Each structure stands twice: as C-alpha cells, then as structure tokens.
Image (spheres, grey):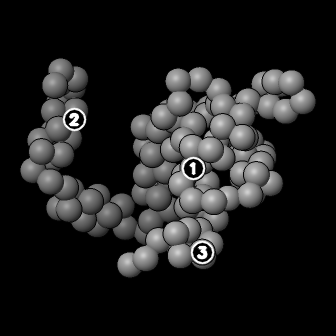
C-alpha cells in the first residue's frame, strides 16, 4: 500500500492530527507550528499545520503559550493517557462490553497478556 503523502495524495484528517500529536509527544518541550511542520514527514503547507494545531487546541488537546507573534504548543495529555482515554471511550460506546473485552484480550500478544495480568494484580514492577 502506498503512502498518500509520498505519492502526492492527502492524508486523512484524523491521521494528520495523530501525526501532529506524535511530533508533539516526542518533543522535549513546546513546539511552534514551523517546528512541527519541519518534523512531519512529507511536504505540508504551513497553513495546514496551523489549522491542525488550532483544531487540536480548540478540542482541548493542546495548550499554547505566546512565543513572538505566534504560539508554541504542548499536548495536554501524554500519549499513554490519550490512548487509554480513547480505548475507554470506545469500550463505553460498544453494545457488548464483555464481547469487546474478550476480543481485545484474545488479540493480545503473550507478552501483552502477561503484562495486563500483572497490572490487574496490582504488580506495577516490570
């Protein structure tokens, strides 16, 4: 399957938001739109990155601080917290919670299943 960015196509909106969040999560501190744009793969217009950052800020997923004439952005939650909240949200909107959980557990690797068992027992040591 080809990469839509490399072949001149467009990324789906959700994927672009995820890519922007990924760049911000990997950064040691706040980033400007230009810094985010530079870190993203492919060629994106600066205005596109600004739009995505503004949307993420409006959704409450980013904070921003004034930096010169623009802003520097920081994620509100780390990647683990964001992913966990998304998983809980999906689970809450399903009609058969037990079936969803059973399917999720059955699709885990042996290592992830063992880790989940440790976490459920309250054993935080790895």
Closer to the camera in the image, 29 or 55:
29
Q: Report if residue 85 is visible in the image.
A: no
Left or right, 111 with respect to 97, comes to: left
Measure the alpha-carbon separation of dots 1 and 3.
Answer: 15 Å
Q: Report if residue 3 is visible in the image.
A: yes
**Res. 8 mark:** 3
Task: Please identify the quadrant where the N terminus is shown.
Answer: bottom left
For marks 3 and 2 on the same chain, the one whose residue lies earlier in the sequence: 3
Of badges 2 and 1, nearer the viewer stands 1
Local secondary structure at mark 1: loop
Local secondary structure at mark 3: loop
| Residue 86 x %, y % | 49, 50
Instruction: Please tell me which residue is depicted at 51% across the width and 44% down the height of the picture.
Output: 22
Closer to the camera in the image, 38 or 36:
38
The answer to whether mark 3 and mark 2 are in CB contact below 8 A is no
Q: Quadrant of residue 8?
A: bottom right
Residue where numbered disc 2 is placed: 120
Measure the alpha-carbon separation of dots 3 and 2.
Answer: 46 Å
Instruction: Please tell me which residue is depicted at 18% across the width and 21% down the height of the picture.
Output: 125
| Residue 71 x %, y % | 80, 31
Closer to the camera in the image, 25 or 108:
25
């Amino acid at each position: 399957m080809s990469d839509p960015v490399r072949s001149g196509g467009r990324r789906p909106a959700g994927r672009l938001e995820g890519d922007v969040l990924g760049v911000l999560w990997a950064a040691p501190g706040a980033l400007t739109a230009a810094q985010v744009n530079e870190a993203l793969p492919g060629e994106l217009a600066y205005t596109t990155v600004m739009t995505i950052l503004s949307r993420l800020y409006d959704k409450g997923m980013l904070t921003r601080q004034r930096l010169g004439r623009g802003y520097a952005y920081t994620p509100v939650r780390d990647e683990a917290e964001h992913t966990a909240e998304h998983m809980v949200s999906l689970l809450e909107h399903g009609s058969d919670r037990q079936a969803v959980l059973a399917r999720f557990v059955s699709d885990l690797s042996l290592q992830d299943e063992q880790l989940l068992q440790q976490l459920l027992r309250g054993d935080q040591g790895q």
